[in-house]
Image (cartoon, grey):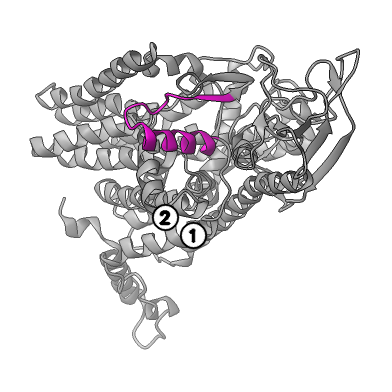
Protein backbone atom coordinates (compact mmCIF):
# COMPACT_ATOMS: atom_id res chain seq x y z
CA UNK A 1 0.00 0.00 0.00
CA UNK A 2 1.47 3.33 -1.04
CA UNK A 3 1.65 6.35 1.17
CA UNK A 4 -0.60 8.21 -1.23
CA UNK A 5 -3.34 5.61 -0.87
CA UNK A 6 -3.15 5.88 2.90
CA UNK A 7 -4.37 9.49 2.83
CA UNK A 8 -7.46 9.28 0.64
CA UNK A 9 -9.61 12.05 2.03
CA UNK A 10 -9.02 14.35 -0.95
CA UNK A 11 -9.27 11.56 -3.52
CA UNK A 12 -12.45 10.20 -1.92
CA UNK A 13 -14.08 13.62 -2.00
CA UNK A 14 -13.02 14.21 -5.61
CA UNK A 15 -14.50 10.91 -6.78
CA UNK A 16 -17.72 11.57 -4.87
CA UNK A 17 -18.07 15.02 -6.41
CA UNK A 18 -17.49 13.70 -9.91
CA UNK A 19 -20.10 11.00 -9.38
CA UNK A 20 -22.63 13.50 -8.12
CA UNK A 21 -21.88 15.96 -10.91
CA UNK A 22 -22.56 13.22 -13.46
CA UNK A 23 -25.88 12.50 -11.80
CA UNK A 24 -27.03 16.12 -12.23
CA UNK A 25 -28.99 16.74 -15.40
CA UNK A 26 -27.71 19.45 -17.81
CA UNK A 27 -28.93 22.89 -16.90
CA UNK A 28 -30.01 21.87 -13.39
CA UNK A 29 -28.52 23.79 -10.46
CA UNK A 30 -25.54 22.05 -8.88
CA UNK A 31 -26.14 20.54 -5.42
CA UNK A 32 -24.99 22.74 -2.58
CA UNK A 33 -22.58 20.07 -1.45
CA UNK A 34 -20.57 20.34 -4.67
CA UNK A 35 -19.56 23.87 -3.75
CA UNK A 36 -18.02 22.75 -0.45
CA UNK A 37 -14.81 20.90 -1.37
CA UNK A 38 -13.57 20.75 2.22
CA UNK A 39 -12.05 17.30 2.02
CA UNK A 40 -10.78 17.79 -1.53
CA UNK A 41 -8.69 20.72 -0.39
CA UNK A 42 -7.45 18.90 2.71
CA UNK A 43 -3.78 17.99 2.53
CA UNK A 44 -2.31 15.01 4.38
CA UNK A 45 0.28 17.23 6.05
CA UNK A 46 -2.51 19.10 7.82
CA UNK A 47 -3.69 16.05 9.78
CA UNK A 48 -0.83 15.77 12.33
CA UNK A 49 -0.90 19.53 12.88
CA UNK A 50 -4.64 19.45 13.50
CA UNK A 51 -4.30 16.53 15.92
CA UNK A 52 -1.55 18.27 17.92
CA UNK A 53 -3.62 21.46 18.16
CA UNK A 54 -6.72 19.49 19.14
CA UNK A 55 -4.80 17.58 21.81
CA UNK A 56 -3.40 20.79 23.26
CA UNK A 57 -6.83 22.41 23.22
CA UNK A 58 -8.25 19.47 25.18
CA UNK A 59 -5.44 19.19 27.76
CA UNK A 60 -3.86 22.61 28.30
CA UNK A 61 -6.83 23.88 30.36
CA UNK A 62 -5.98 21.24 32.97
CA UNK A 63 -2.28 21.92 33.55
CA UNK A 64 -3.01 23.40 36.99
CA UNK A 65 -4.90 20.29 38.08
CA UNK A 66 -4.00 19.19 41.60
CA UNK A 67 -2.18 15.89 42.00
CA UNK A 68 -4.89 13.25 42.15
CA UNK A 69 -5.30 9.58 43.07
CA UNK A 70 -1.94 7.78 42.57
CA UNK A 71 -0.18 10.86 41.18
CA UNK A 72 1.20 11.21 44.71
CA UNK A 73 3.03 7.88 44.54
CA UNK A 74 4.60 8.68 41.18
CA UNK A 75 5.81 12.08 42.36
CA UNK A 76 7.20 10.54 45.56
CA UNK A 77 9.12 7.95 43.54
CA UNK A 78 10.40 10.63 41.15
CA UNK A 79 11.81 12.68 44.01
CA UNK A 80 13.44 9.55 45.42
CA UNK A 81 15.02 8.84 42.01
CA UNK A 82 16.61 12.30 41.97
CA UNK A 83 18.37 11.44 45.24
CA UNK A 84 19.02 7.74 44.57
CA UNK A 85 18.74 7.01 40.83
CA UNK A 86 19.26 3.26 41.20
CA UNK A 87 16.90 2.83 44.15
CA UNK A 88 13.51 4.16 43.00
CA UNK A 89 11.45 2.58 45.77
CA UNK A 90 13.90 2.63 48.66
CA UNK A 91 11.78 4.64 51.09
CA UNK A 92 8.77 4.20 53.37
CA UNK A 93 5.26 5.60 53.02
CA UNK A 94 2.02 5.36 54.96
CA UNK A 95 -0.41 4.46 52.20
CA UNK A 96 -2.17 1.27 53.24
CA UNK A 97 -3.08 1.81 56.92
CA UNK A 98 0.50 1.70 58.20
CA UNK A 99 4.10 2.57 57.38
CA UNK A 100 5.43 0.25 54.68
CA UNK A 101 8.30 0.18 52.18
CA UNK A 102 7.40 1.88 48.92
CA UNK A 103 8.36 -1.23 46.94
CA UNK A 104 5.61 -3.07 48.81
CA UNK A 105 3.01 -0.36 48.24
CA UNK A 106 3.47 0.49 44.56
CA UNK A 107 2.39 -1.95 41.88
CA UNK A 108 3.83 -0.11 38.88
CA UNK A 109 7.33 -0.15 37.38
CA UNK A 110 9.34 3.07 37.62
CA UNK A 111 9.90 4.34 34.06
CA UNK A 112 7.19 7.02 34.30
CA UNK A 113 8.72 8.17 37.59
CA UNK A 114 12.17 8.35 35.95
CA UNK A 115 10.65 10.57 33.28
CA UNK A 116 9.01 12.72 35.97
CA UNK A 117 12.34 12.92 37.83
CA UNK A 118 14.09 14.32 34.75
CA UNK A 119 11.28 16.80 34.07
CA UNK A 120 10.99 17.78 37.72
CA UNK A 121 14.71 18.44 37.94
CA UNK A 122 14.68 20.56 34.79
CA UNK A 123 11.38 22.45 35.21
CA UNK A 124 10.45 22.11 38.87
CA UNK A 125 7.94 20.05 40.80
CA UNK A 126 4.86 22.21 40.43
CA UNK A 127 1.66 20.79 39.04
CA UNK A 128 1.98 22.95 35.95
CA UNK A 129 5.51 21.78 35.20
CA UNK A 130 4.73 18.09 35.51
CA UNK A 131 1.43 18.28 33.66
CA UNK A 132 3.16 20.09 30.81
CA UNK A 133 5.81 17.37 30.77
CA UNK A 134 3.15 14.67 30.53
CA UNK A 135 1.54 16.44 27.59
CA UNK A 136 4.37 14.99 25.50
CA UNK A 137 3.31 11.32 25.91
CA UNK A 138 -0.29 12.33 25.23
CA UNK A 139 0.65 14.01 21.95
CA UNK A 140 2.87 11.06 21.00
CA UNK A 141 -0.06 8.72 21.68
CA UNK A 142 -2.41 10.66 19.41
CA UNK A 143 0.12 11.00 16.59
CA UNK A 144 1.13 7.36 16.99
CA UNK A 145 -2.51 6.31 16.67
CA UNK A 146 -2.75 8.37 13.49
CA UNK A 147 0.39 6.77 12.03
CA UNK A 148 -0.78 3.29 12.98
CA UNK A 149 -4.25 3.92 11.58
CA UNK A 150 -2.69 4.71 8.18
CA UNK A 151 -1.84 1.02 7.96
CA UNK A 152 -5.40 -0.09 8.72
CA UNK A 153 -7.81 2.44 7.26
CA UNK A 154 -8.23 5.11 4.59
CA UNK A 155 -9.39 7.52 7.30
CA UNK A 156 -6.53 7.75 9.82
CA UNK A 157 -7.49 11.27 10.91
CA UNK A 158 -10.94 10.03 11.90
CA UNK A 159 -9.40 7.10 13.79
CA UNK A 160 -7.04 9.30 15.82
CA UNK A 161 -9.74 11.89 16.56
CA UNK A 162 -12.17 9.16 17.64
CA UNK A 163 -9.57 7.92 20.13
CA UNK A 164 -8.61 11.38 21.37
CA UNK A 165 -12.12 12.73 21.99
CA UNK A 166 -13.08 10.18 24.64
CA UNK A 167 -13.40 10.42 28.44
CA UNK A 168 -10.93 7.59 28.93
CA UNK A 169 -8.17 9.41 27.09
CA UNK A 170 -8.79 13.02 28.13
CA UNK A 171 -9.22 12.32 31.85
CA UNK A 172 -6.29 9.90 31.97
CA UNK A 173 -4.04 12.35 30.12
CA UNK A 174 -4.65 15.01 32.79
CA UNK A 175 -2.75 12.93 35.35
CA UNK A 176 0.97 12.30 35.92
CA UNK A 177 0.46 8.58 36.32
CA UNK A 178 1.95 5.99 33.99
CA UNK A 179 -1.06 5.03 31.86
CA UNK A 180 -0.85 7.48 28.97
CA UNK A 181 2.92 7.09 28.71
CA UNK A 182 2.63 3.30 28.65
CA UNK A 183 0.05 3.44 25.86
CA UNK A 184 2.09 5.94 23.86
CA UNK A 185 5.05 3.55 23.89
CA UNK A 186 2.68 0.67 23.08
CA UNK A 187 1.32 2.39 19.97
CA UNK A 188 4.79 3.43 18.78
CA UNK A 189 5.99 -0.15 19.25
CA UNK A 190 3.02 -1.44 17.22
CA UNK A 191 3.78 1.02 14.41
CA UNK A 192 7.45 0.06 14.17
CA UNK A 193 6.78 -3.67 14.58
CA UNK A 194 4.23 -3.74 11.75
CA UNK A 195 6.39 -1.63 9.45
CA UNK A 196 9.37 -3.87 10.16
CA UNK A 197 7.72 -7.13 9.18
CA UNK A 198 7.30 -6.77 5.41
CA UNK A 199 9.92 -6.67 4.20
CA UNK A 200 11.58 -7.90 7.35
CA UNK A 201 13.88 -5.15 8.59
CA UNK A 202 15.94 -6.05 11.67
CA UNK A 203 16.58 -2.43 12.79
CA UNK A 204 12.82 -1.80 12.90
CA UNK A 205 12.15 -5.00 14.80
CA UNK A 206 14.87 -4.22 17.34
CA UNK A 207 13.47 -0.74 17.95
CA UNK A 208 9.96 -2.18 18.25
CA UNK A 209 11.15 -4.74 20.78
CA UNK A 210 12.87 -2.03 22.84
CA UNK A 211 9.69 0.07 22.77
CA UNK A 212 7.67 -2.93 23.97
CA UNK A 213 10.14 -3.36 26.81
CA UNK A 214 9.83 0.34 27.68
CA UNK A 215 6.04 0.08 27.63
CA UNK A 216 6.16 -2.89 30.02
CA UNK A 217 8.56 -1.05 32.32
CA UNK A 218 6.21 1.94 32.39
CA UNK A 219 3.20 -0.15 33.33
CA UNK A 220 3.22 -3.92 33.54
CA UNK A 221 0.24 -4.27 31.22
CA UNK A 222 2.51 -3.04 28.43
CA UNK A 223 3.97 -6.54 28.37
CA UNK A 224 0.65 -7.71 26.88
CA UNK A 225 1.91 -6.33 23.58
CA UNK A 226 4.40 -9.23 23.39
CA UNK A 227 1.75 -11.93 22.69
CA UNK A 228 -0.27 -9.45 20.62
CA UNK A 229 2.71 -8.67 18.38
CA UNK A 230 3.49 -12.40 18.14
CA UNK A 231 -0.08 -13.24 17.12
CA UNK A 232 -0.12 -10.53 14.48
CA UNK A 233 3.20 -11.57 12.96
CA UNK A 234 2.25 -15.24 12.94
CA UNK A 235 -1.08 -14.52 11.24
CA UNK A 236 0.65 -12.31 8.68
CA UNK A 237 3.69 -14.49 7.98
CA UNK A 238 1.87 -17.82 8.35
CA UNK A 239 4.97 -19.36 9.90
CA UNK A 240 7.55 -18.83 12.61
CA UNK A 241 10.64 -16.97 11.60
CA UNK A 242 13.57 -15.02 12.92
CA UNK A 243 11.12 -12.21 13.70
CA UNK A 244 10.00 -14.15 16.78
CA UNK A 245 13.48 -13.93 18.29
CA UNK A 246 13.21 -10.15 18.60
CA UNK A 247 10.32 -10.56 21.04
CA UNK A 248 12.80 -12.13 23.44
CA UNK A 249 14.23 -8.64 23.99
CA UNK A 250 11.27 -7.35 26.07
CA UNK A 251 11.02 -10.74 27.78
CA UNK A 252 14.66 -10.50 28.85
CA UNK A 253 14.24 -6.85 29.86
CA UNK A 254 11.31 -7.68 32.14
CA UNK A 255 13.17 -10.68 33.55
CA UNK A 256 16.14 -8.41 34.24
CA UNK A 257 13.85 -5.98 36.06
CA UNK A 258 12.51 -8.87 38.15
CA UNK A 259 16.05 -9.89 39.12
CA UNK A 260 17.17 -6.30 39.75
CA UNK A 261 14.29 -5.50 42.07
CA UNK A 262 14.71 -8.83 43.85
CA UNK A 263 18.32 -7.92 44.54
CA UNK A 264 17.28 -4.46 45.78
CA UNK A 265 14.24 -5.30 47.89
CA UNK A 266 14.22 -9.05 48.41
CA UNK A 267 11.15 -9.36 46.20
CA UNK A 268 10.89 -9.26 42.42
CA UNK A 269 8.34 -6.54 41.79
CA UNK A 270 7.11 -7.85 38.44
CA UNK A 271 5.74 -11.08 39.90
CA UNK A 272 4.75 -9.31 43.10
CA UNK A 273 2.35 -7.12 41.10
CA UNK A 274 0.50 -10.19 39.80
CA UNK A 275 -0.67 -10.92 43.34
CA UNK A 276 -2.57 -7.63 43.43
CA UNK A 277 -4.08 -8.26 40.01
CA UNK A 278 -5.79 -11.36 41.36
CA UNK A 279 -6.94 -9.73 44.59
CA UNK A 280 -10.66 -9.65 45.24
CA UNK A 281 -12.32 -7.85 48.10
CA UNK A 282 -14.15 -10.63 50.01
CA UNK A 283 -16.95 -8.18 50.83
CA UNK A 284 -17.48 -7.16 47.21
CA UNK A 285 -19.57 -10.25 46.44
CA UNK A 286 -19.85 -9.65 42.69
CA UNK A 287 -20.11 -12.53 40.25
CA UNK A 288 -18.26 -12.96 36.96
CA UNK A 289 -21.41 -11.81 35.16
CA UNK A 290 -21.55 -8.66 37.29
CA UNK A 291 -17.90 -7.89 36.66
CA UNK A 292 -18.47 -8.44 32.95
CA UNK A 293 -21.33 -5.94 32.92
CA UNK A 294 -19.30 -3.42 34.92
CA UNK A 295 -16.40 -3.92 32.53
CA UNK A 296 -18.69 -3.33 29.57
CA UNK A 297 -19.97 -0.17 31.24
CA UNK A 298 -16.42 1.12 31.59
CA UNK A 299 -15.59 0.23 27.98
CA UNK A 300 -18.68 1.99 26.62
CA UNK A 301 -18.35 5.00 28.88
CA UNK A 302 -14.62 5.55 28.44
CA UNK A 303 -14.82 4.95 24.67
CA UNK A 304 -17.76 7.25 24.13
CA UNK A 305 -17.33 7.57 20.35
CA UNK A 306 -18.53 3.98 20.08
CA UNK A 307 -21.92 5.24 21.25
CA UNK A 308 -22.04 8.55 19.39
CA UNK A 309 -21.06 6.96 16.07
CA UNK A 310 -23.48 4.04 16.38
CA UNK A 311 -26.27 5.68 14.30
CA UNK A 312 -23.80 6.27 11.48
CA UNK A 313 -22.05 2.92 11.31
CA UNK A 314 -24.85 0.45 12.13
CA UNK A 315 -28.11 -0.41 10.42
CA UNK A 316 -31.32 0.35 12.31
CA UNK A 317 -32.00 -3.29 13.13
CA UNK A 318 -28.51 -3.66 14.64
CA UNK A 319 -29.05 -0.55 16.75
CA UNK A 320 -32.40 -1.89 18.01
CA UNK A 321 -30.79 -5.20 18.97
CA UNK A 322 -28.03 -3.39 20.87
CA UNK A 323 -30.55 -1.19 22.66
CA UNK A 324 -32.65 -4.21 23.61
CA UNK A 325 -29.68 -6.09 25.06
CA UNK A 326 -28.48 -3.05 26.99
CA UNK A 327 -31.99 -2.32 28.26
CA UNK A 328 -32.36 -5.92 29.45
CA UNK A 329 -29.06 -5.63 31.32
CA UNK A 330 -30.20 -2.36 32.88
CA UNK A 331 -33.52 -3.89 33.93
CA UNK A 332 -31.90 -6.88 35.64
CA UNK A 333 -29.54 -4.56 37.48
CA UNK A 334 -32.26 -2.14 38.56
CA UNK A 335 -34.39 -5.01 39.90
CA UNK A 336 -31.47 -6.34 41.93
CA UNK A 337 -31.23 -9.64 40.05
CA UNK A 338 -27.50 -9.09 39.55
CA UNK A 339 -25.41 -7.84 42.45
CA UNK A 340 -23.01 -5.11 41.39
CA UNK A 341 -22.00 -4.18 44.94
CA UNK A 342 -21.84 -0.40 45.53
CA UNK A 343 -24.32 -0.34 48.47
CA UNK A 344 -23.89 3.43 48.88
CA UNK A 345 -25.52 3.97 45.47
CA UNK A 346 -28.61 1.83 46.10
CA UNK A 347 -30.75 4.85 46.96
CA UNK A 348 -30.27 5.95 43.34
CA UNK A 349 -30.09 2.47 41.85
CA UNK A 350 -32.63 3.01 39.07
CA UNK A 351 -30.74 6.07 37.87
CA UNK A 352 -27.41 4.25 38.13
CA UNK A 353 -28.67 1.22 36.21
CA UNK A 354 -30.09 3.45 33.46
CA UNK A 355 -26.75 5.15 32.92
CA UNK A 356 -24.95 1.82 33.01
CA UNK A 357 -27.29 0.48 30.32
CA UNK A 358 -26.31 3.38 28.05
CA UNK A 359 -22.61 2.67 28.55
CA UNK A 360 -23.18 -1.04 27.95
CA UNK A 361 -24.82 -0.13 24.63
CA UNK A 362 -21.62 1.70 23.70
CA UNK A 363 -19.55 -1.34 24.60
CA UNK A 364 -21.80 -3.55 22.46
CA UNK A 365 -21.09 -1.22 19.53
CA UNK A 366 -17.31 -1.43 20.12
CA UNK A 367 -17.33 -5.21 20.46
CA UNK A 368 -19.52 -5.55 17.37
CA UNK A 369 -17.03 -3.45 15.41
CA UNK A 370 -14.24 -5.88 16.28
CA UNK A 371 -16.31 -8.99 15.61
CA UNK A 372 -17.79 -7.81 12.30
CA UNK A 373 -14.41 -6.57 11.11
CA UNK A 374 -12.87 -10.00 11.69
CA UNK A 375 -15.80 -11.87 10.15
CA UNK A 376 -15.63 -9.78 6.99
CA UNK A 377 -11.87 -9.65 6.52
CA UNK A 378 -10.39 -12.62 8.41
CA UNK A 379 -6.86 -11.29 8.05
CA UNK A 380 -3.96 -10.41 10.34
CA UNK A 381 -5.11 -6.80 10.68
CA UNK A 382 -8.61 -7.67 11.89
CA UNK A 383 -7.19 -10.30 14.25
CA UNK A 384 -4.74 -7.77 15.68
CA UNK A 385 -7.45 -5.16 16.29
CA UNK A 386 -9.88 -7.70 17.73
CA UNK A 387 -7.36 -9.06 20.21
CA UNK A 388 -6.40 -5.48 21.09
CA UNK A 389 -10.03 -4.77 22.00
CA UNK A 390 -10.88 -7.92 23.92
CA UNK A 391 -7.55 -8.39 25.72
CA UNK A 392 -7.76 -5.23 27.88
CA UNK A 393 -11.49 -5.84 28.47
CA UNK A 394 -10.90 -9.36 29.81
CA UNK A 395 -8.04 -8.13 31.99
CA UNK A 396 -10.03 -5.17 33.35
CA UNK A 397 -13.23 -7.10 34.00
CA UNK A 398 -12.00 -10.49 35.17
CA UNK A 399 -8.30 -10.46 36.05
CA UNK A 400 -7.49 -7.10 37.61
CA UNK A 401 -8.21 -6.38 41.28
CA UNK A 402 -10.74 -3.72 40.25
CA UNK A 403 -12.40 -2.43 37.11
CA UNK A 404 -11.27 1.08 36.28
CA UNK A 405 -10.76 3.45 33.39
CA UNK A 406 -6.99 3.11 33.58
CA UNK A 407 -7.18 -0.58 32.61
CA UNK A 408 -9.70 0.13 29.83
CA UNK A 409 -7.58 2.94 28.34
CA UNK A 410 -5.31 0.62 26.24
CA UNK A 411 -8.15 -0.47 23.95
CA UNK A 412 -9.21 3.08 22.97
CA UNK A 413 -6.80 3.49 19.99
CA UNK A 414 -7.98 0.18 18.54
CA UNK A 415 -11.60 1.28 18.96
CA UNK A 416 -10.87 4.48 17.04
CA UNK A 417 -9.25 2.54 14.20
CA UNK A 418 -12.17 0.10 14.02
CA UNK A 419 -14.63 2.99 13.84
CA UNK A 420 -12.72 4.43 10.89
CA UNK A 421 -12.62 1.04 9.16
CA UNK A 422 -16.36 0.65 9.65
CA UNK A 423 -17.03 4.18 8.34
CA UNK A 424 -14.93 3.36 5.29
CA UNK A 425 -17.14 0.35 4.61
CA UNK A 426 -20.52 2.04 5.02
CA UNK A 427 -19.60 5.32 3.28
CA UNK A 428 -18.21 4.42 -0.15
CA UNK A 429 -16.89 7.22 -2.32
CA UNK A 430 -19.82 7.20 -4.75
CA UNK A 431 -22.30 8.21 -2.05
CA UNK A 432 -22.99 11.75 -0.90
CA UNK A 433 -20.67 12.74 1.88
CA UNK A 434 -21.15 15.55 4.35
CA UNK A 435 -18.44 16.57 6.76
CA UNK A 436 -20.98 17.29 9.48
CA UNK A 437 -21.77 13.58 9.69
CA UNK A 438 -18.25 13.05 11.01
CA UNK A 439 -17.89 16.22 13.04
CA UNK A 440 -21.16 15.90 14.98
CA UNK A 441 -20.44 12.58 16.78
CA UNK A 442 -16.84 13.60 17.37
CA UNK A 443 -17.89 16.96 18.80
CA UNK A 444 -20.57 15.38 21.00
CA UNK A 445 -18.13 12.86 22.45
CA UNK A 446 -15.44 15.53 22.85
CA UNK A 447 -17.72 17.98 24.66
CA UNK A 448 -19.00 15.32 27.05
CA UNK A 449 -15.43 14.15 27.64
CA UNK A 450 -14.31 17.68 28.48
CA UNK A 451 -17.27 18.07 30.80
CA UNK A 452 -16.21 14.92 32.66
CA UNK A 453 -12.57 16.05 32.71
CA UNK A 454 -13.62 19.38 34.26
CA UNK A 455 -15.52 17.48 36.96
CA UNK A 456 -12.45 15.34 37.69
CA UNK A 457 -10.34 18.52 37.71
CA UNK A 458 -12.65 20.01 40.35
CA UNK A 459 -12.58 16.81 42.39
CA UNK A 460 -8.77 16.79 42.42
CA UNK A 461 -8.59 20.47 43.29
CA UNK A 462 -11.06 20.05 46.15
CA UNK A 463 -8.45 18.03 48.07
CA UNK A 464 -5.87 20.76 47.58
CA UNK A 465 -8.38 23.42 48.65
CA UNK A 466 -9.38 21.44 51.73
CA UNK A 467 -5.75 20.92 52.72
CA UNK A 468 -5.13 24.67 52.48
CA UNK A 469 -8.19 25.41 54.62
CA UNK A 470 -7.19 22.82 57.22
CA UNK A 471 -3.68 24.27 57.34
CA UNK A 472 -5.11 27.74 57.98
CA UNK A 473 -7.48 26.48 60.69
CA UNK A 474 -4.73 24.60 62.52
CA UNK A 475 -1.85 27.02 62.05
CA UNK A 476 -1.40 27.51 65.81
CA UNK A 477 -1.26 23.84 66.79
CA UNK A 478 1.81 22.79 68.76
CA UNK A 479 1.61 19.14 67.71
CA UNK A 480 1.52 17.94 64.10
CA UNK A 481 -1.87 17.61 62.48
CA UNK A 482 -2.80 14.05 61.54
CA UNK A 483 -4.93 12.94 58.62
CA UNK A 484 -6.57 9.86 57.20
CA UNK A 485 -7.05 9.11 53.51
CA UNK A 486 -4.43 9.25 50.82
CA UNK A 487 -4.32 10.14 47.10
CA UNK A 488 -3.75 13.83 46.33
CA UNK A 489 -5.04 14.80 49.77
CA UNK A 490 -1.98 13.14 51.29
CA UNK A 491 0.40 15.08 49.01
CA UNK A 492 -1.02 18.44 50.05
CA UNK A 493 -1.44 17.64 53.73
CA UNK A 494 2.18 16.49 53.96
CA UNK A 495 3.30 19.63 52.14
CA UNK A 496 1.94 21.57 55.14
CA UNK A 497 3.70 19.34 57.64
CA UNK A 498 0.77 17.08 58.54
CA UNK A 499 1.35 13.36 59.10
CA UNK A 500 -0.70 10.37 57.96
CA UNK A 501 -2.40 8.42 60.74
CA UNK A 502 -0.85 5.00 61.30
CA UNK A 503 -3.49 2.51 62.41
CA UNK A 504 -0.99 -0.26 63.23
CA UNK A 505 1.76 1.75 64.91
CA UNK A 506 -0.16 4.47 66.77
CA UNK A 507 1.35 7.90 66.20
CA UNK A 508 -1.42 9.92 67.81
CA UNK A 509 -2.14 11.29 71.26
CA UNK A 510 -4.97 13.11 73.07
CA UNK A 511 -5.54 16.64 71.91
CA UNK A 512 -4.14 16.24 68.40
CA UNK A 513 -6.09 17.38 65.37
CA UNK A 514 -7.19 14.67 62.93
CA UNK A 515 -8.48 15.50 59.42
CA UNK A 516 -10.75 12.91 57.79
CA UNK A 517 -11.89 13.12 54.14
CA UNK A 518 -15.32 11.72 53.39
CA UNK A 519 -14.59 10.57 49.81
CA UNK A 520 -11.16 8.97 49.89
CA UNK A 521 -9.39 5.66 50.40
CA UNK A 522 -8.77 4.22 53.87
CA UNK A 523 -10.63 7.03 55.59
CA UNK A 524 -12.41 5.62 58.62
CA UNK A 525 -13.23 7.74 61.65
CA UNK A 526 -11.37 8.35 64.87
CA UNK A 527 -8.87 5.67 65.96
CA UNK A 528 -9.90 3.21 68.69
CA UNK A 529 -10.33 4.85 72.08
CA UNK A 530 -10.84 8.37 70.80
CA UNK A 531 -13.66 10.62 69.71
CA UNK A 532 -14.17 14.33 69.45
CA UNK A 533 -16.42 17.05 68.06
CA UNK A 534 -16.04 17.46 64.31
CA UNK A 535 -15.80 20.64 62.32
CA UNK A 536 -17.06 20.06 58.80
CA UNK A 537 -15.37 21.65 55.77
CA UNK A 538 -17.34 21.46 52.53
CA UNK A 539 -15.98 22.14 49.06
CA UNK A 540 -18.68 22.52 46.42
CA UNK A 541 -17.76 20.91 43.10
CA UNK A 542 -21.11 20.27 41.43
CA UNK A 543 -20.77 20.14 37.65
CA UNK A 544 -23.68 17.78 37.08
CA UNK A 545 -21.27 14.85 36.67
CA UNK A 546 -18.56 13.21 38.76
CA UNK A 547 -15.89 10.56 38.38
CA UNK A 548 -15.68 9.32 42.00
CA UNK A 549 -18.73 9.36 44.27
CA UNK A 550 -20.07 6.22 45.98
CA UNK A 551 -23.53 7.70 46.51
CA UNK A 552 -23.84 8.19 42.75
CA UNK A 553 -22.19 4.91 41.75
CA UNK A 554 -19.24 6.64 40.08
CA UNK A 555 -15.90 4.83 40.25
CA UNK A 556 -13.66 6.03 37.40
CA UNK A 557 -10.52 4.97 39.29
CA UNK A 558 -12.03 1.93 41.00
CA UNK A 559 -15.33 0.12 40.60
CA UNK A 560 -15.28 -0.42 44.37
CA UNK A 561 -16.69 3.12 44.47
CA UNK A 562 -19.39 2.26 41.96
CA UNK A 563 -20.13 0.42 38.69
CA UNK A 564 -20.09 3.57 36.53
CA UNK A 565 -16.96 5.23 35.10
CA UNK A 566 -18.75 8.55 35.69
CA UNK A 567 -22.23 9.49 36.82
CA UNK A 568 -24.50 12.37 35.88
CA UNK A 569 -26.76 14.15 38.36
CA UNK A 570 -26.53 16.42 41.36
CA UNK A 571 -23.09 16.03 42.95
CA UNK A 572 -22.93 16.54 46.73
CA UNK A 573 -20.04 18.66 48.05
CA UNK A 574 -16.78 17.07 49.13
CA UNK A 575 -16.70 16.94 52.94
CA UNK A 576 -13.73 16.92 55.32
CA UNK A 577 -14.01 16.46 59.08
CA UNK A 578 -11.57 18.12 61.47
CA UNK A 579 -11.60 16.38 64.87
CA UNK A 580 -9.68 17.04 68.09
CA UNK A 581 -8.92 13.59 69.52
CA UNK A 582 -10.52 13.03 72.92
CA UNK A 583 -10.12 9.75 74.85
CA UNK A 584 -13.27 7.75 75.53
CA UNK A 585 -14.03 4.44 77.19
CA UNK A 586 -15.80 2.83 74.26
CA UNK A 587 -14.21 2.81 70.82
CA UNK A 588 -17.41 2.00 68.94
CA UNK A 589 -17.52 5.23 67.02
CA UNK A 590 -18.97 4.85 63.53
CA UNK A 591 -17.91 7.15 60.73
CA UNK A 592 -20.24 10.11 60.29
CA UNK A 593 -20.94 9.08 56.69
CA UNK A 594 -19.04 8.30 53.60
CA UNK A 595 -16.99 5.58 52.15
CA UNK A 596 -14.32 3.69 54.10
CA UNK A 597 -12.39 1.98 51.33
CA UNK A 598 -10.88 -1.49 51.59
* Residue pictured at 38% horizontal, 41% vertical: 117
Q: Residue furthest bottom?
A: 27
Q: Locate residue 147 relative to residue 497 in the image: left or right.
A: left
Q: Nearer the viewer, residue 154 or 35?
A: 154
Q: Comparing marks 2 and 1, which lies closer to the viewer?
A: 1
Label 1 SS: helix
The local crowd at label 2, few if under 14, some if 14 to 19, many if 20 or more residues have their Cα within 10 Å, is many
Q: Residue furthest front?
A: 478
Label 2 SS: helix
Whether residue 537 can be seen here: yes
* Residue pictured at 65% horizontal, 26% vertical: 560
Question: Residue 477's image quarter?
Answer: top right
**Of pointers 2 and 1, the one earlier in the residue sequence:** 1
Image mark for residue 419 = none
Q: Position of residue 25 (x, y in %)?
A: 36, 81
Q: Is residue 554 above or below residue 251?
A: below
Q: Nearer the viewer, residue 17 or 310?
A: 310
Q: Which residue is mark 2?
A: 161
Q: Locate residue 134 relative to residue 554 in the image: left or right.
A: left
How many marks on residues?
2
Q: Nearer the viewer, residue 137 or 264?
A: 264
Stretch of the chain drawn in magenta = 70-94
Q: Position of residue 499 (x, y in %)?
A: 65, 31
Q: Is the Cβ of the residue at disc 2 closer than 8 Å to that at disc 1?
A: no
82 in the magenta segment: yes
Q: Which residue is mark 1?
A: 60
Q: Position of residue 167 (x, y in %)?
A: 54, 47
Q: Position of residue 544 (x, y in %)?
A: 72, 51
Q: Locate residue 175 relative to residue 221 in the image: left or right.
A: right
Rounded to the nearest angstrom, the CA distance separating label 2 from label 1 is 17 Å
Q: Is residue 201 above or below residue 343?
A: below
Amino acid sequence: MSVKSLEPEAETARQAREAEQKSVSPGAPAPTWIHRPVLEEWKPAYSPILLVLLTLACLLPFIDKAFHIDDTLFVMAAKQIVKHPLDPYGFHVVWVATDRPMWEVTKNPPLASYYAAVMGTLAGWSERALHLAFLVPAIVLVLGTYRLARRFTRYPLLAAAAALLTPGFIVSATSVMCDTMMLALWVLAAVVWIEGLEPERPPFLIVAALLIAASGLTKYFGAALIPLAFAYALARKRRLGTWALYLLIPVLALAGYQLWTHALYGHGLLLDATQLAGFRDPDEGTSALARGLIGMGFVGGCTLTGLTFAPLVWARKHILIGIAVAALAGLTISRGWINLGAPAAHANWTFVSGQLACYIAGAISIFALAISDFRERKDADSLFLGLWIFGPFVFAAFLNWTVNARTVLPLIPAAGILLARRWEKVRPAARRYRLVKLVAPLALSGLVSLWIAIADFDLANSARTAAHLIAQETAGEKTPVLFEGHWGFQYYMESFGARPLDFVKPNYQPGQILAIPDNNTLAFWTPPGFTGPAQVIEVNISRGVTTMKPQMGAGFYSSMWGPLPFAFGHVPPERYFVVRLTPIRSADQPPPSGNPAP
